[in-house]
Image (tube, rainbow, N blue to C red):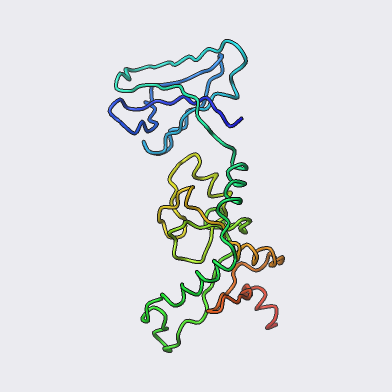
Amino acid sequence: SDLELQLKCFHHEDRQMNTNWPASVTVSVNATPLNIERGDNKSTHKPLYLKDVCQAGRNTIQITVTACCCSHLFVLQLVHRPSIRSVLQGLLRKRLLPAEHCITKIKRNFSSVPPNSAVNAEDGVEQTAIKVPLKCPITCRRITLPARGHDCKHIQCFDLESYLQLNCEKGLWKCPVCNKSALLEGLEIDQYIWGILTNMTNMQFEEVTINQTASWKPVPVKSMIKEEDS
């Protein structure tokens, strides 16, 4: 079951009920102390999930405070907390953008580039291809399942599983490439880039160039270029 028992603390004036733990609060369940993640600022505090430390029958939650926290309230609630794997599978079923749609988007990307930005200032040559990284901007590792937000204009993708792991807890849901909002329900899996990643078995290649017709080729890394020259 994806049901989870959540305990959180929040300021009584906060209608959004954002998690906010006073520094004086500690929590234990069935005599097991729990680690409260407060992060660097108020927006990075995380709720506690208790299912793993609970047992069938009677359970005891002990909340200890060393200073007054009358300004805060506690809430214990059952919440749906699906696993990353089940969220991934759901997105694969519902949000897989067919390759032909992705190709149309790429061609539109070229045609929508303003004239000034599509011309190299030095030689006046029109941009006919763009470099697309195959590494995730979150992990700096090769992307496994490429995704973007619906409102993202760029071709570059991020790794979907890494993005979900980052945001299911922090809940920022911002594209790591363009910083636009990229909420869960608006994520799109790019079947065209996925095909490139599947065909690109040589892990040495970190980028590809994609041209106006959506044809692609790998970009040799510097070490490979040096070997060819020597």
Query: Residue farthest to the left?
Result: 13
95 or 190: nearer the eye?
95
Find residue 120 and report its horizontal and vertical position in percent: 42, 83
| Residue located 46% across and 73% down the image | 108
x, y percentage for residue 179? 41, 56
Using the image, determine if residue 39 lies above or below residue 229: above
Count of marks overlaid on the render: 0
Quadrant in the picture for residue 122: bottom left
At 32% from the left and 27% from the top, the residue drawn is 11
Of the pair 134 and 146, the residue shown nearer to us: 146
Question: In the image, 155: left or right of 205?
Answer: left
Residue at horizontal 37 percent and vertical 77 percent from the top: 114
Which quarter shows the C terminus? bottom right
The residue sitting at the bottom extreme is 123
Above or below, 86 against 18 in this view is below
- The one nearer the camera, 15 or 74, is 15
Q: Quadrant of residue 142?
A: bottom right
In this view, the residue in front, 149 or 65, is 149
Q: Is residue 200 left or right of residue 78?
A: right
Relative to 142, 114 lies left or right: left
Give the answer, above or below, for where 74 lies relative to 229. above
Q: Can you give x and y, in whole percent of width and height, for residue 215 in the image?
A: 60, 77
- Residue depicted at 50% across the width and 53% down the height: 187
For the N terminus, the quadrant is top right
